[in-house]
Image (spheres, coloured by chain):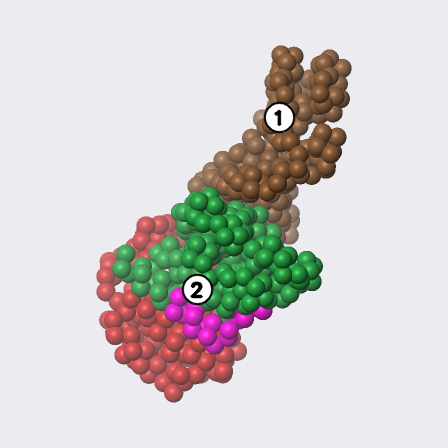
Amino acid sequence: MSNTNNNVGFAIEAKRLRKSFGSNLVLNELDMSVDWGSFTVIFGSNGSGKSTLVNNLATISTPTSGEIYVAGFDIKKEKALIRKNIGVVTHELLLYSDLTAYENLFFYGKMFNLPDIEHKIELTAEITGAKDYLRKKIKHMSHGMQKRIAIGRAILHDPPILFLDEPESGLDQEALERLYEMIRSGQNGKRTILMTTHNIDRGLEMGDRVTVLSKGKISYDKKRVDINRDVFEGDYISLRQSQL
Amino acid sequence: MKRSLVVVRTILWKDLLLELKSKDVIISIVSFAMLALVIFNFAFGSSSQLASLIAPGAIWVSITFAGVIGLNRLFVIEHDQGSIIGLLLTPVSRDSIYFGKMLSMFVFLTISEIILLPIYAILFNTSIIHPLFLLIVALGTIGFASLGTLFSAMAVNTRSREIMLPVMFLPIVMPILIGSVVASANILDGGGWSDASRGIHIIIVFDVLSLIVSPLLFEQIIQE
Amino acid sequence: MISMRDKNLGTIRKLFLAIGGSAMVLNMYLIFMWVPTEKNLGIIQRIFYLHVPTAWVAFIAFFLVLIGSTGYLIKKSKLWDRLALASAEVGVLFTTVLIVTGVMWAKPVWGVWWNWDPRLTTSLILWLIYLAYLMLRSYAPSPEQGAKYAAILGIVGFLDVPIVYFSIKWWRTLHPQAVIGPGSTGELDSSMRLLLLISTAIFTILFVHLLTTRMSLRKMEERLEEANHIVS
């Protein structure tokens, strides 16, 4: 998409981010910044606030306090511009199961005000390998194919930033990994990807930066090349236990 | 402005397409309203004189209760597979999402009424194809859909939403019901504009207020 | 932990209760012993000095729900939410009393328990709206959502009241009226008017006491919830 403040500062930046539900503080003064073009993995156990973090960064939830900038835009003032620049894949499909894949994608294309939607749908279906399934209802598809359409929905408007919130759900892992490699490159270069997961193997294989979210903060942050898998697993387990 | 119209139309198109495939909303409204009507008849007797007396009340009460059932469905379809999140992630104003959903509800109700009113006319032996009567129907439907959309978005997140929606919505929507029942009774009795104008004014005040307040509050509901 | 400030507030509230309580006893004496019996209506007219102040307090309460709700939606602070919730609860309580005293009045004066008089009917619908308001809080997915949803209902509900009233008034005038409306109770003499003012003032004191007590209770409930969270 156009009108990004590309190459200005960070792709994603959060400062002193707090989010509480009642008296339950889920994100506590969280600071993080994500470089353009990077693939960042966030590990965390269930209930560590991974989804809450993504929801706040992706304009779905409103933070209790703190600042967020995505693609250089202030989340308080320019939500619509941020929404143009991000794509989101969650454990839910975010699709209408009674509509066909084509109808779903057409609806979102219209909502994003895309020119030449038919062509964009073709292109997306080609990338995600869903070309032969466009005329099928979502509810009549296999889980794997549904996921492909959901990913197609997220990249239809060619956003430079992608949020993947626990995208795996017991699916064909290899196929998914290949798919994620394909969606890494957008039309204007490498996409920035932020992925949450609790699957250590998957995360270490795909990310080039590895972080752990615990007690509402980023408590571990290293480049993938500096990490020894076994040492990480030990560290991660002790981090998780300290959280309990 | 033009962009908002496209968004509203797109949401309407999507809802109509879904409805075309599932026929959920309209079928439940029509069948429930018919059922309520038949029960009314058992409760109040079937002499033709009585029929014209209870017709306005029976018509509006059955449409109101059936409409609440339709409203319950309006945001349930958005929660299927979390699609409401998908909708909120689109770069469109929250007002246009509200007006899109409101228009969908308005169209669902109008289609149901187009099916129901001729049936009522036959069952009650009254001619209801009167321009003023149709005006009352249209205005009442606007208010019902506009406030109902706000409450439906709220109720869908609550526990036992099937109960919460009517409990919240029916007392608030009472002026429309009263205005419609009395104004229709006046017209079916052979009255004209001067008899029905007061009721129509009440409905218009309700509509205007609801169309101003509901979109303002809608954003508060859908933003977590 | 109880802070000094809370302790002081508690003392003020106790004092307030003592003054208000004695005033209420005095009020009852004035209503049932001091004021002369109305000639046409007889002894039942005395309920008027309870009924009218109750209506006044209920109206103030629901107005405060509107204020608290609007404040909460703008500021998102718990203080506003407490004000709205406490006002709604006290308002529902007073509306209940209002309707019950209205029914007690109606039977001997009009010969029926209930006559769908615009004011009675509006009170009934008001009661239903704010009952839904209290229900909504307990059926909401989270306390925040509950507060937000209730605030929305609090605003819409209050704006709706005048429309409800005028629609019912219009509906009533078009239907045969079986009995005389409550507007025609005759002239009030000066001692009656004075007592009405006194009683209204004392009921307002009672309202303020109930409201502030409920608000501080709510604050404690919130703290308890917080403490439970830390433990679990």
Instruction: Give above or below for C129 relative to B32.
Output: above
Question: Is the residue under label 2 in contact with that under label 1 (CB below 8 Å)?
Answer: no
Q: Residue at x 35, y 65 (%)?
A: B9
The kind of residue on which mark 1 rests is Ser
**Disc assigned to residue C184:** 1
Q: Residue at x 60, y 27 (%)?
A: C183
Q: Secondary structure at mark 1?
A: helix
Q: Is residue C153 left or right of residue C220?
A: left
Q: Chain of mark 1?
A: C
Chain that appears red: A
A217 vs A124, nearest the viewer: A124
C216 vs A107, nearest the viewer: A107
- Is disc 2 surrounded by few (<14), some (14 to 19) or many (20+) residues within 10 Å? some
**Disc assigned to residue B107:** 2
Q: Secondary structure at mark 2?
A: helix
The kind of residue on which mark 2 rests is Val
Q: Position of residue B104 (x, y in %)?
A: 43, 63
Chain C, hue in figure: brown
Q: Position of residue C166 (x, y in %)?
A: 51, 39
Q: Which residues are magenta?
A: B12-32
